[in-house]
Image (cartoon, rainbow, N blue to C red):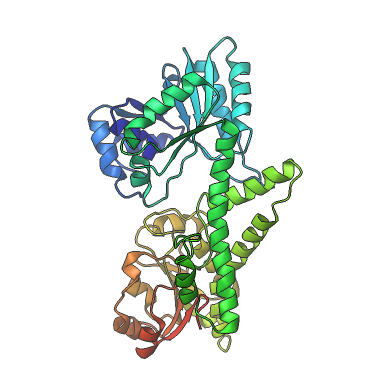
Amino acid sequence: MVAGAGFAEFGNDVLCADVDAEKVKRLNRGEIPIYEPGLESLVVRNTKEGRLQFTTDVNNAVSDVDVVFVAVGTPSAADGRADLSQVLNVARTVAENAQAFTIVVNKSTVPVGTADRVMAILREHGPGKDFAVVSNPEFLKEGDAVNDFMKPARVIIGTDDERARKKMRYLYEPFVRTVDRIFEMDARSAEVTKYACNAMLATRISFMNEIAALCSEVGADVAKVRVGMATDGRIGPRFLFPGVGYGGSCFPKDVKAIISTAADHGSELKILKAVEAVNERQKVLLADMVLKKLADRPAKELVVSLWGLAFKPHTDDVREAPAMTICRRLLDAGASLQLHDPVAGPCFAEELPPSERVRYFDHNFDAAQGADALLLVTEWPAYRRPDFRRLKKAMRTPLLFDGRNQWDPETVRELGFAYVGIGRP
């Protein structure tokens, strides 16, 4: 959606095709099916001006175009490998319907060698037709995707076809006029780059969660340790925040996929296996802290409030969200849940429906009413400076579990709360 609207904004004619008829109907009515800041105005404007269209006629959509961006899902299979069935199905569709020279761009995150597999399918199902394949991984952060696309930090074009290289550069040059941030390479290097970037970021997160665990044991404060680390220019400040683990549609599946890819080629990525194991442990940490802290009470009598359900702020995406793991752990123990998120509640409720022990609230203070513990899981801005006096009156037990280290321990303790952070004394 972001790529289609972004390309249209720079004057290109873009046709977005999807097999989900209901989604396409909503888009044609001007309704955006995902929450992404800045996207709605971009879509509405370009749809109104005729540069952006939506269709379920996939065959026709790929029949007479210069470039086809493949932006379908590549979820994890049972063995951790990326499921490429949707990518390969699109390749067959393009091969069967293309009319002239067509550039097929893998925008989806795919394992090394996928560009070769796509080209093989294009040749098999489109004999005599002319194709080129490009690996063009996306680096969009959910919650800031429009800004990332319109002002990219880098654009990677992976292909050995000179025609495709020139066309892709022509397409992206308007986005990088100030500084040329287009990097050209072969397809396999581009495919590895995407996985390597996500694996490195996931590694930093799990590393800081390990350091936070150490801080808890020795009585140090990870918040202070983080500041000391961040001032080192070789390390920098980003992705150094401990918390409840990473989630979303990218890091979990991409770490699994690169581990599987390495195994397929006889290599073992020991560091990334540890990264994955640390993250799985971290996602249950907050729930275990609650149950340990309140072990003197029957779990079936506990009421636990969660603030934040999306895997990160500024999105309604709940895929692999730590909040889901926390909720299921607490429910299995017998506790009741009161949940709030500024936008992700409906999406979360699709996986964890409301029930006698699972209640959703439109206001965060209502979700805290009568709670024995409040867990801050997603660091939405609205949660950073709440009225703690009001919060204390609402809760049955003034016990805070700060899964993102957003609150000042001294401040909340002075107001009468018991406070538990991640890696804080």
Q: What residue is drawn where x is 33% and y is 85%?
A: 393
Q: Quadrant of residue 359?
A: bottom left
Find residue 144 and report its horizontal and vertical position in percent: 36, 50
Q: Is residue 166 above or below residue 240?
A: above
Q: Quick one: which residue is furthest to the right in this view? A: 266
Q: Is residue 160 above or below residue 100?
A: below
Find residue 86 and report its horizontal and vertical position in percent: 56, 34
Q: Is residue 283 above or below residue 87?
A: below
Looking at the image, which is closer to me, 7 or 323?
7
Find residue 256 and report its horizontal and vertical position in percent: 63, 50
Q: What residue is drawn where x is 57% and y is 23%?
A: 92
Locate residue 164 relative to residue 45 in the image: left or right: right
Q: Quick one: which residue is furthest to the top in this view? A: 128
Q: What residue is drawn where x is 56% and y is 30%?
A: 186
Q: Quadrant of residue 18?
A: top left
Looking at the image, which is closer to me, 341 or 214?
214
Q: Is residue 282 above or below residue 10?
A: below
Find residue 37 and report its horizontal and vertical position in percent: 31, 50
Counting labels gives 0
Quarter of the image with the N terminus in it:
top left
Asked if one can make out residue 31 in the rendered structure from this viewpoint, the answer is: yes
Asked if one can make out residue 55 in the rendered structure from this viewpoint, the answer is: no
